[in-house]
Amino acid sequence: MDKSELLELKKTACNVRLWTIEGVFNAKSGHPGGSLSAADIMTYLYFKEMNVDPKNPKDPKRDRFVLSKGHCCPSLYAALALKGFFPTDEIKSLRHIGAMLQGHPDMKHTPGIDMSSGSLGQGISAACGMALAGKLSNESYRVYAMLGDGECEEGQVWEAAMFASHYKLDNLVAFVDFNGLQIDGSVADVAGLDKLDEKFKAFGFEVIKIDGHDFEQIEDALNKAKTVKGKPTVIIAATVKGKGVSYMENQVGWHGKAPDAEQYQKAMDELKAQLKELEA
């Protein structure tokens, strides 16, 4: 990608983070840490990679995305809003009773959501079903899913992995947002995922490891995934929990709580300063 395109992606990702914080603050609850770590991948998928149309969100030929770690929907909502699926002001009603944007993705009421998710381990299974349907129908769409690293402790993830390999779902790309932290502490302490790349290889996946905050690495990985035939791809993305907000970065306590007014202002000031620097 050229420099101007890279710059636009960086600015969009910064805005995704701004609206993520806006949503969680207004909800007074939510999951900012993993939403912020996933923001760059979300940005690349929706603003560069995927064939999606906000004017036709149910287009049968569209690419699909499943947020298997559904609790990190604030950054997905931010990306969808900035893409034009719904007004950004909807984000301020996140998690409010009767609002469109709930604490986990809802495919029935939110434009752009391809699968309701949140029960960890289940989203990747739904993505496998979508990919198999595409194969059986001879459709060219691709299916993308995002898992959390802690989510990979769920047995259903590995059932889905067996399924994806068995049916040679080369139209499926799974991301693992590997920020190293989950609700109870570090992933290594809770149930270590040593040699996660080797585990996925053993299950029949093409494995690519990247820095999940580097747009050029994200692009290279997705381009490589398009050349893989006869098996699914997993992209293990090393990320920073709470990326972009200094006091949230690598702090497990920000897995699932909202900032207070002072913390909100500090986060917004930091992100706006980053955006201003990019726009200079």
Image (cartoon, rainbow, N blue to C red):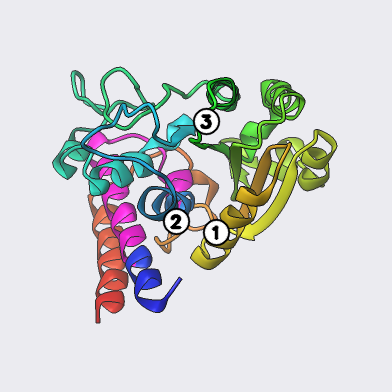
CB of mark 3 within 8 Å of CB of mark 1?
A: no
CA separation in Å, label 3 and label 2: 17 Å
Relative depth, front residue between 250 and 99: 99
Label ID, residue 68: 3
The image quadrant that residue 28 belongs to is top left
Q: Is 229 located above or below residue 97 in the figure?
A: below
Please tell me which residue is depicted at 37% across the width and 41% down the height of the picture: 76
Relative depth, front residue between 204 and 238: 204
Q: Quadrant of the C terminus?
A: bottom left
For residue 92: magenta? no
Please tell me which residue is depicted at 19% across the width and 24% down the height of the picture: 99
- Residue assigned mark 2: 40
Label ID, residue 218: 1
**Label 1 residue SS:** helix
Q: First in sequence: mark 3 or mark 2?
A: 2
CA separation in Å, label 3 and label 1: 19 Å
The image quadrant that residue 172 belongs to is top right
Q: Which of labels 1 and 2 is toward the front?
A: 1
Q: Position of residue 113 (x, y in %)?
A: 35, 29
Residue farthest along the bottom direction in this orientation: 280
Q: In the image, what residue type sits under mark 2? A: Asp
Side (left or right) of 159 relative to 73: right
CA separation in Å, label 1 and label 2: 9 Å
Q: Is 41 located above or below residue 135 in the figure?
A: below
CB of mark 1 within 8 Å of CB of mark 2?
A: yes
